Image (spheres, rainbow, N blue to C red):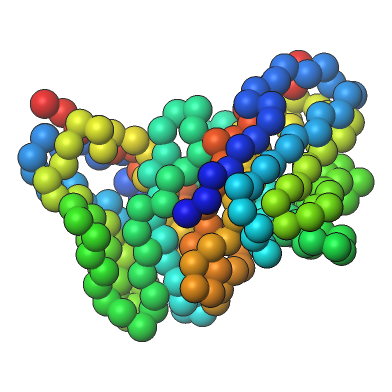
Amino acid sequence: DQQVKQNSPSLSVQEGRISILNCDYTNSMFDYFLWYKKYPAEGPTFLISISSIKDKNEDGRFTVFLNKSAKHLSLHIVPSQPGDSAVYFCAASFGTASKLTFGTGTRLQVTL
Amino acid sequence: SAVISQKPSRDICQRGTSLTIQCQVDSQVTMMFWYRQQPGQSLTLIATANQGSEATYESGFVIDKFPISRPNLTFSTLTVSNMSPEDSSIYLCSVALGTSGETQYFGPGTRLLVL
């Protein structure tokens, strides 16, 4: 049972444009959500997170939106840069310092 | 964040053998975790490494196959025992940081190939 889903396995965006990565979850008890970026042969790098009490969190070029009623979150990257090309994972947890449940990942390619 | 290192970074092993993976953090942390990423798959939690007590394993993972040690607040090991080709994966440790340990930071991973 995949509780966290990323339905787009890949996404291609032109440099300078907006990248929107989507994530859906099924368990309404999740209360903390995170986005990670992963390059090949490296561990995941934490990007940004959001608590279930918020609907938006922004950090530089990265913004995460949470729609609890739809059980949906999205990561916006503006403007997209070639260095953003990587696999992006969303993850969810119950409370603090608890296990992360990961989505299947979306491969983002930012083209020139 | 924290600086997390893992050894070895990669290894090729024969089936039936065991490999111990080390995870070192540059600061004391309460919560450490071990994850696995099988080829083409997402990350799955193997267990929570508890300092001073036995690890807490997720469904589908057992101590005999994946024994874990956590001798102090900066170090942990994961052993993959009696390996088979299905154990070929990337193994990652993570630590929970933040005000309430809500954010996990990951090590670089250990890429294991079992022949």
Quadrant where the C terminus of chain B is found in the figure: top right
The furthest residue to the bottom: A53
The furthest residue to the left: A16
At a point 81% along the width and 33% down the height, the residue shown is: B20
Q: Is residue A15 above or below residue A24?
A: above
Q: Nearer the viewer, residue B69 or B79?
A: B69
Q: Nearer the viewer, residue B2 or B91?
A: B2
Q: Is residue B59 left or right of residue A7?
A: right
Q: Locate residue B35, reporting x and y percent.
A: 64, 47
Q: Is residue A52 visible?
A: yes
Q: Is residue B19 above or below residue B53?
A: above
The furthest residue to the front: B27
Q: Locate residue A37, reporting x and y percent.
A: 38, 44
Q: Nearer the viewer, residue A18 or B106?
A: B106
At a point 72% along the width and 17% down the height, the residue shown is: B12
Q: Locate residue B41, reporting x and y percent.
A: 54, 40
Quadrant of the rendered structure where residue A71 is?
bottom left
Query: What is the number of callouts on the image?
Result: 0
Q: Is residue A9 visible?
A: no
Q: Is residue A51 left or right of residue B49?
A: left
At a point 27% along the width and 52% down the height, the residue shown is: A21
At a point 12% along the width and 46% down the height, the residue shown is: A79
